[in-house]
């Protein structure tokens, strides 16, 4: 049996929706030969409801900083984004240590991320292959 840790960005439901389709397909293709652990916090209820008939596990973990908009606007709130980013990064080294322990303890064979940055450094340190899935780059979202 192979173990996959599937990290899903905490930014909205789009990442979760796309990931659900991938998780369903992988589960159907590999069945009982695949152990899949879903890592997310924001869309956890949606993920659980959407994957009830699939053999997956869920792990609640903050995977990244979401995109914050100004009140009643589609413009980003740069101050709030920076504030949340700094708070997230204050614990970055400890967070990476925890993730490395999680990957090691669960004998993870593959990391898939849509597109949380969280698992890539620990996966690399443990020589676990990793795949990033996205339909845009964070550069385009945050460049301004």
Image (cartoon, rainbow, N blue to C red):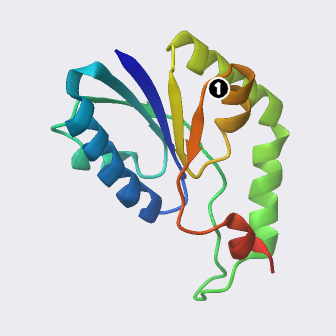
Nearest to the observer: residue 84 or residue 98:
98
Residue under numbered circle 1: 99
Q: Quadrant of residue 104?
A: top right
Q: Residue at x 30, y 39 (%)?
A: 26
- Is residue 123 found left or right of 21 in the rendered image? right
| Residue 95 locus on image (x, y percent) | 72, 30
Instruction: Kindly give the residue lying farthest to the left in the view shown.
Output: 53
Q: Secondary structure at mark 1?
A: helix
Q: Count every numbered label the image shows and give the total.
A: 1
Q: Residue at x 39, y 19 (%)?
A: 2
Q: Residue at x 66, y 40 (%)?
A: 118
Nearest to the observer: residue 98 or residue 24:
24
Q: Quadrant of the N terminus?
A: top left
Instruction: Kindly give the residue lying farthest to the bottom in the view shown.
Output: 73
Q: Residue at x 42, y 22 (%)?
A: 3
Mark 1, other Cα within 10 Å: few <14 / some 14–19 / many ≥20: some
44 in relation to 60, above or below: below
Q: Quadrant of residue 62?
A: top right
Q: Quadrant of residue 56?
A: top left
Q: Examine the rendering and report whether any part of residue 48 can be seen.
A: no
| Residue 17 locus on image (x, y percent) | 36, 59
| Residue 92 locus on image (x, y percent) | 79, 36
Q: Quadrant of the C terminus?
A: bottom right
- Is residue 28 found left or right of 132 in the rendered image? left
- Is residue 7 found left or right of 47 in the rendered image? right
Q: Examine the rendering and report whether any part of residue 88 can be seen.
A: yes
Nearest to the observer: residue 17 or residue 12:
17
| Residue 89 locus on image (x, y percent) | 81, 44
């Amino acid at each position: 049996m192979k173990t996959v840790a599937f990290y899903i960005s905490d930014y909205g439901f789009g990442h979760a929706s796309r990931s659900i389709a991938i998780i369903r397909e992988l589960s159907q293709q590999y069945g009982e030969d695949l152990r899949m652990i879903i890592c997310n916090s924001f869309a956890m209820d949606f993920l659980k409801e959407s994957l009830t008939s699939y053999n997956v596990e869920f792990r609640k973990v903050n995977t990244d900083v979401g995109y914050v908009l100004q009140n009643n606007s589609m413009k980003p709130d740069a101050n709030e984004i920076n504030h949340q980013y700094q708070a997230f990064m204050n614990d970055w080294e400890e967070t990476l240590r925890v993730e490395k322990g999680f990957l090691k303890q669960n004998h993870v064979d593959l990391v898939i991320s849509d597109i949380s940055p969280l698992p890539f450094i620990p996966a690399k340190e443990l020589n676990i292959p990793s795949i990033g899935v996205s339909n845009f780059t964070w550069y385009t979202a945050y460049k301004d």
